[in-house]
Structures are given as C-alpha cells and as structure tokens.
Image: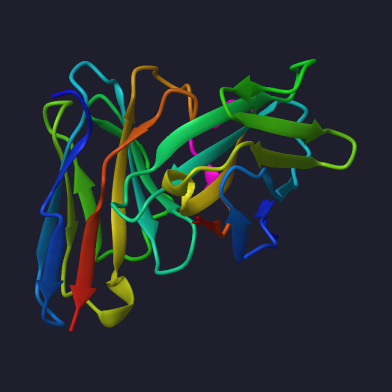
Amino acid sequence: AQKITQTQPGMFVQEKEAVTLDCTYDTSDPSYGLFWYKQPSSGEMIFLIYQGSYDQQNATEGRYSLNFQKARKSANLVISASQLGDSAMYFCAMREGDDYKLSFGAGTTVTVRA
Amino acid sequence: GAGVSQSPRYKVAKRGQDVALRCDPISGHVSLFWYQQALGQGPEFLTYFQNEAQLDKSGLPSDRFFAERPEGSVSTLKIQRTQQEDSAVYLCASSLGGTLGGYGYTFGSGTRLTVV
C-alpha cells in the first residue's frame, strides 16, 4: 500500500496567488514526521518544511505552511504569494517511528504563470 | 564542501556495461542514503550507511547493485551489467545524525543514468 499519496500530478497557479498541494499518508505508527521537498529542474531535493506527529501547531516556514489534519491523515502544503521561481516538482514524504528512511509520494508539478 | 556532491551529473551506459556513481557527502555527516528516482516518480530508498557500516540495503533492486562507503565519507553506488530499467536519477543524501531520518537530510543534485 502507498504510504504517501499525492493526487495532483500538475497544477498551474498565477503569480502572487496561493496554491495548496495535497498529501495524504498512511501509517499505524503514532510517531512520524512529514516533510515537503521542492525539486527544481536542476534535480536537487530542497527541504521546505517539517511537521512532527506530536506537534500541536501547524508548521510554517516563510511562504510555506503545512495544513496538518491528523485525523484525516493529511498534510497539505500551502505556498502563499507564488513566485515564478516556485515552478518545480513538489514531494511529500514521511518518516515513521525510529526509521531512518523517507517514503515519498509521486509528486506534484507546479507551474507559476506570470 | 558546502553541499552533497554527486558525480557524474549525467551518465549514458550501454546495456550490459558496469557503472559507478560517486557521492561526496557533507563533511562530518554520519548518515548517507542512496535513493533511485524513476522518471516522473518520487525517490525510492535504496540503501543506508552509518559511517562505513551499511545498515540497510533492503531497497537495492537486485544483486547487480552494490554500494560502499569504505572510510565513512565518500560513497560509491555500483551497478553491474546495466539494464534499461536501471535508467533513473540516483540521489544521494547525507545527514548529521545517526539514526535521525529525514529531518536534516541534505540531498545532492543526483546522477541521471540512461541505459541505451
């Protein structure tokens, strides 16, 4: 079974608007971490934001915020005030318990239009 | 160096050829990971090192894949007798922690392998 599901293969957003990228996850471990990465065409995976399963508040990092709904097992990424440089592939990932590896979703391509 | 360095950036191999992909992690990073990313997909875990010890190789798809990190720094992923299905981007990541996974990962830019 897929541990991370990203149902939006591609999205277009107008510059300066906000965009929400969906991510649902599946785990039975009460302790887990959720991550979002950005992968531009250069190929490097760039860490954006992290949410721990026991964190009481939604994570925020600059223009990035994570809408964490634990009961629904969703961890959507919100990018506010989109910029042309935000055009990239975005991946949601999860680490479970004491495991050291990440499980990634299939990604969502975001294209920001001027 | 400041980041994780991978070489070569691009590799074209003829089917059946052996290849070696290099990863130079951030100095002092204990943990090193290899991931395989097929076109249009998310990365898939291949193997994990803590210093020179390979603690998990459960993601290696076949015995044609071999990874080493003999001195606990630079790592090499070797693929023998390459097949077309090996075509992918191979990403290396390192982190400072021992078993702390994910948080604190730094990824390299990857090696894009094309088998023809």
- The magenta stretch spans residue A100: yes
Q: In which quarter of the image is the C terminus of chain B?
A: bottom left
| Depth order, front residue of A49/B15 | A49
**Main SS class of the magenta portion in the image:** loop
User: Is A67 placed left or right of B44 in the picture?
Assistant: right
Please give the name of the residue rendered at 45% of the width and 54% of the height, measured from the top-left corner: B44
- The magenta stretch spans residue A18: no
Q: Quadrant of the N terminus of chain B?
A: top left
Please give the name of the residue rendered at 61% of the width and 55% of the height, measured from the top-left corner: A13
Q: Where is residue A46 in the image (x, y as percent from the top left)?
A: 40, 37
In the picture shown, does residue A43 fall above or below A71?
A: below
Residue A61 in which image quadrant: top right
Residue B82 in which image quadrant: bottom left
| Depth order, front residue of B70/A26 | A26
Q: Position of residue B110 (x, y in %)?
A: 25, 50
Q: What stretch is highlighted in magenta?
A: A96-103
